[in-house]
Image (cartoon, helix red, strand yellow):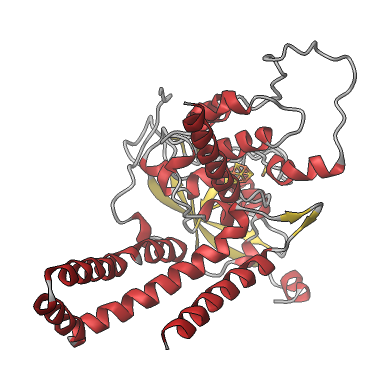
């Protein structure tokens, strides 16, 4: 449909939203809303419209509305998406919006992301200085060449939106699995030339809840809105984990 | 691990039917089943060879039955499909570079297929 047509026609579309109000219902239920749309209406715009004009009780998260903060993740027709980066114009027929899969639902489209945040912090996602050789903390800035930066740059683009966890059946089956974003973050620091914490992270990565919980389904990388390719990071992590097992074996 | 609260729906056993992408994944994983049959055939062959001529001939007879041939053709197609998926994933797991030059993924995939063809040609030359 051309922009001209969209301007002259008042377009409306139907949006089915999964509601959950724990004080009033034991289970989620579906509610259909009719919203106006044009060429630029995002899922988040539609939700805002419903909240402002039709039902102020609708709950969902958002902040930046420009794919930076990572808080507006929802399932759109069963696929995890950022609400602010997904547009009504790309869908035909009624839209189904649900909270992110594999997380407990708190209210409407808001899920409890505690497990995800715990997994992120569990991998020590910060530069770990060289304690072993007891290098004195330098007051000089850490220098890094463009080539050293390029090694981990792609994996540093994660915005912690959690879409990859909703795409990952292994996380869905076992919430103890550290999951795509946390394992990617660990790999990102392991690849950083300024970091010496790889050995500290390895015990956790080299476990069933770590990289070996992944079977390379690969859907995480399909849904990632930032092109991070977590599946690649996790499976590069398997190579590293296998190497460290071999080295430990030879050292006895 | 503590969870604040909330409604939870456990994943049911048919989760992989929900999306085309998951079905392709399950197909990739399922390629191991016909392959197990092929490996079983090979092990039986080696065993019957050790048992003597009668056993060996019986095994050859078994292998020529049409359903056995059919299953083994399926195993071949399944492993080719598995190779296809594996080759595409490989450059993401093992990105290769020459000095500062990152070898593009398509070149690695093409290289792997060339290796397959080379191995087939080598065995063809050896046995034919
Ligand atoms: S890896 Fe991608 S999908 Fe996963 S949390 Fe980070 S930005 Fe979101
Ligand atoms: S509102 Fe911030 S990522 Fe969508």
A169 vs B71: above or below: above
Query: How many numbered circles does the render carry?
Result: 0
Left or right of B2: which side holds A15? right
A112 vs B12: above or below: above
Residue at x 87% of width, y 39% of height: A145
Left or right of B94: which side holds A205? left
In front: B115, or B55?
A: B55
Residue at x 62% of width, y 28% of height: A198
Q: Is residue A111 visible?
A: no
A119 vs A230: above or below: above
Q: Is residue B79 visible?
A: yes
Left or right of A148: which side holds A140? right
Percent x, y of residue B35: 31, 68
Percent x, y of residue A13: 57, 64
* Image-quarter location of ligand 2: top right
Q: Quadrant of the N terminus of chain B?
A: top left
Which residue is the extreme one toward the left?
B54
Residue at x 20% of width, y 86% of height: B64
Left or right of A37: which side holds B22? left
In front: A182, or B1?
A: A182
Q: Quadrant of the C terminus of chain B?
A: bottom left
* Snapshot quadrant of residue B33: bottom left
* Snapshot quadrant of residue A22: top left
Residue at x 64% of width, y 27% of height: A125
Percent x, y of residue A9: 70, 72
Percent x, y of residue A85: 67, 53
A62 vs A120: above or below: below
């Amino acid at each position: 449909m051309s922009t001209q047509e969209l301007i002259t026609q008042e377009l409306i579309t139907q949006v089915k939203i999964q509601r959950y109000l724990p004080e009033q219902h034991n289970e989620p239920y579906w509610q259909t809303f009719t919203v106006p749309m044009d060429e630029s209406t995002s899922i988040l715009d539609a939700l805002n419209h419903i909240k402002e004009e039709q039902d102020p009780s609708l709950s969902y998260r958002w902040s930046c509305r420009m794919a930076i903060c990572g808080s507006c993740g929802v399932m759109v027709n069963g696929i995890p998406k950022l609400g602010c980066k997904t547009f009504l114009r790309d869908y035909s027929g009624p839209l189904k919006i649900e909270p992110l899969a594999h997380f407990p639902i708190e209210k409407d489209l808001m899920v409890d992301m505690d497990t995800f945040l715990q997994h992120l912090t569990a991998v020590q996602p910060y530069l770990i200085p060289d304690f072993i050789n007891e290098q004195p903390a330098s007051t000089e800035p850490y220098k890094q060449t463009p080539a050293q930066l390029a090694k981990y740059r792609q994996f540093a683009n994660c915005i912690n939106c959690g879409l990859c966890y909703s795409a990952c059946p292994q996380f869905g089956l076992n919430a103890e699995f550290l999951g795509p974003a946390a394992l990617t973050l660990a790999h990102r620091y392991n690849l950083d030339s300024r970091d010496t914490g790889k050995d500290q992270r390895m015990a956790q990565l080299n476990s069933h809840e770590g990289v070996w919980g992944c079977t390379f389904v690969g859907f995480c990388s399909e849904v990632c809105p930032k092109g991070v390719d977590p599946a690649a990071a996790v499976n590069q992590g398997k190579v590293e984990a296998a190497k460290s097992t071999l080295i430990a074996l030879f050292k006895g | 691990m503590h969870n604040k609260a909330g409604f939870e729906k456990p994943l049911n056993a048919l989760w992989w039917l929900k999306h085309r992408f998951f079905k392709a994944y399950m197909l990739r994983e399922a390629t191991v089943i016909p392959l197990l049959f092929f490996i079983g055939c090979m092990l039986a062959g080696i065993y019957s060879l050790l048992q003597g001529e009668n056993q060996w001939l019986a095994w050859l007879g078994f292998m020529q039955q049409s359903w056995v041939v059919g299953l083994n053709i399926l195993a071949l197609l399944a492993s080719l499909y598995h190779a296809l998926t594996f080759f595409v994933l490989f450059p993401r797991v093992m990105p290769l570079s020459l000095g500062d030059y990152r070898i593009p993924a398509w070149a690695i995939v093409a290289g792997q297929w060339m290796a397959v063809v080379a191995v087939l040609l080598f065995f063809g030359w050896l046995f034919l």
